[in-house]
Image (tube, grey):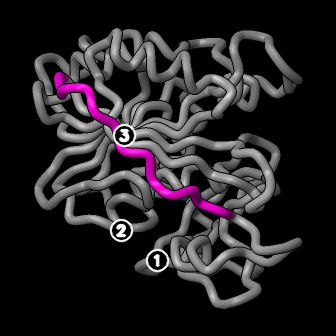
C-alpha cells in the first residue's frame, strides 16, 4: 500500500493504516502488537449513544471504540482510557489523523485510579472490551501488550464494574461490555453487586449450530431488575461467508472481509 506524505508522518515502523469503511475514517495498527477484533466492532453496534451524551471507553487500546461510536452516533464527546502508553499514543495519532481531536480524548491511566483521573465527572455511557481471561488462565502470550489486553493482569472485572458504577450518572447511566459466555454467571452477579443492573443481553455464535463465543451486555446504574435477552447474532452462514447482519454492521458488500477481524 502506498501512503501520501501526511500518512507517512503519522505512521511508525511496522504500523499500517486500516480503512474503517465509515465516514472515511482510518485507524493505525501494528500487526506485531495487539490489534482490535470483531468483538470491538460488534460492541460499537450494540452500544446505544444518544445525541449530546458523553462516553468513556475503558481499556480503549487502539481507540477503535471511540472512533466507531463517534462515526455511528451523535454523542457530544468521547474519552478513551488506556493504561499502556504505547497503545494510547497510537490511538491519539489515529484521532488526529481523522481530525477528531475536538470530539475524542485519549487519556493514559489506570481504571483503578479513575476517580482521580476524572474527579466528580459523570458519563452517560461507559463501554469496555476488557481482558477475558482470569490471571494466567489459558494460553499466555509473551508479548506484554497482548498479554495485558487478554488477561486480567492489571485490572479485573471487579475493578471495571466498581469504578464504572462511580462514574455513571445515577439512575440512567448505561454500561456496555463484550465478554465471553463462560464467565456469564459471574458477570451478571458482579454487575448487580456493583449497582449496575443487567438490562439487555445478546449472545454471538460463530455458526447457527455452534455454541456462543461472545456475549454483549447492557446494564444501567441503579435500575430495577429486568433483563431482555435478544435474538442470537450469527456471524457466518457457512465457511468464509458472513451473514447479512454482520455485513450490515460492517457496511460490506457480499464476500468482503470485515476490517480488523481475526477468525473467531
Q: CA distance from mark 1 to mark 3?
A: 24 Å
> Any magenta on residue 226?
yes
Instruction: Categorize mark 3 by other alpha carbons within 10 Å: few (<14), some (14-19), many (20+).
Output: many
Q: Nearer the viewer, residue 252 or 112?
A: 252
Q: Is residue 110 visible?
A: no
- In terms of secondary structure, where does tag 1 sit? loop
Residue nearest the observer in this picture, 208 or 147: 208
In terms of sequence position, does the residue under pointer 2 or pointer 1 come before the other? 1
Secondary structure of the residue carrying numbered label 2: helix
Asked if the residues shown at circle 2 and circle 1 are in contact, with their CB atoms under 8 angstroms apart, the answer is yes
Q: Give the mark, 1 or 3, whose residue is nearer the N terminus.
A: 1
Mark 1 sits on what residue?
22
Residue at position x 80%, y 52% from top? Answer: 210
Q: Quadrant of residue 185?
A: top right
Residue 67: image location, x then y, percent: 41, 58
What secondary structure is found at the residue carrying circle 3?
strand
**Residue position for label 3:** 218
Does the magenta run of residues contain 152? no
**x, y percentage for residue 241?**
79, 78
Q: Main secondary structure of the magenta part?
A: loop
Q: Which residue appears at 43% of the width and 27% of the height? A: 108
Q: Which residue is mark 2?
A: 71
Tell me the number on the disc at residue 109.
none
Disc 2 versus disc 3: nearer the observer: 3
What stretch of residues is rendered in magenta?
222-234
Amino acid at each position: 500500500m502506498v501512503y501520501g506524505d501526511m500518512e507517512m508522518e503519522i505512521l511508525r515502523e511496522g504500523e499500517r493504516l486500516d480503512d474503517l469503511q465509515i465516514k472515511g475514517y482510518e485507524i493505525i495498527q501494528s500487526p506485531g502488537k495487539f490489534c482490535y477484533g470483531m468483538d470491538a466492532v460488534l460492541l460499537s453496534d450494540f452500544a446505544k449513544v444518544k445525541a449530546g451524551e458523553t462516553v468513556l471507553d475503558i481499556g480503549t487500546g487502539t481507540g477503535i471504540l471511540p472512533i466507531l461510536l463517534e462515526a455511528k452516533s451523535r454523542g457530544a464527546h468521547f474519552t478513551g482510557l488506556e493504561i499502556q502508553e504505547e497503545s494510547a499514543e497510537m490511538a491519539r495519532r489515529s484521532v488526529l489523523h481523522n481530525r477528531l481531536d475536538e470530539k475524542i480524548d485519549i487519556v493514559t491511566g489506570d481504571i483503578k485510579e479513575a476517580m482521580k483521573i476524572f474527579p466528580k465527572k459523570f458519563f452517560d455511557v461507559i463501554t469496555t472490551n476488557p481482558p477475558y481471561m482470569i490471571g494466567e488462565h489459558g494460553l499466555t502470550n509473551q508479548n506484554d501488550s497482548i498479554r495485558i489486553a487478554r488477561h486480567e493482569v492489571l485490572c479485573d472485572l471487579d475493578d471495571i464494574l466498581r469504578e464504572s458504577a462511580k462514574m455513571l450518572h445515577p439512575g440512567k447511566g448505561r454500561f456496555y461490555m463484550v465478554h465471553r459466555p463462560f464467565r456469564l454467571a459471574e458477570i451478571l452477579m458482579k454487575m448487580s453487586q456493583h449497582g449496575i443492573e443487567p438490562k439487555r443481553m445478546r449472545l454471538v455464535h460463530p455458526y447457527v449450530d455452534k455454541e456462543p463465543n461472545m456475549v454483549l451486555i447492557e446494564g444501567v446504574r441503579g435500575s430495577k431488575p429486568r433483563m431482555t435477552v435478544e435474538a442470537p447474532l450469527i456471524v457466518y452462514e457457512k465457511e468464509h461467508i458472513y451473514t447479512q447482519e454482520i455485513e450490515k454492521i460492517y457496511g460490506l458488500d457480499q464476500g468482503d472481509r470485515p476490517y480488523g477481524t481475526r477468525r473467531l
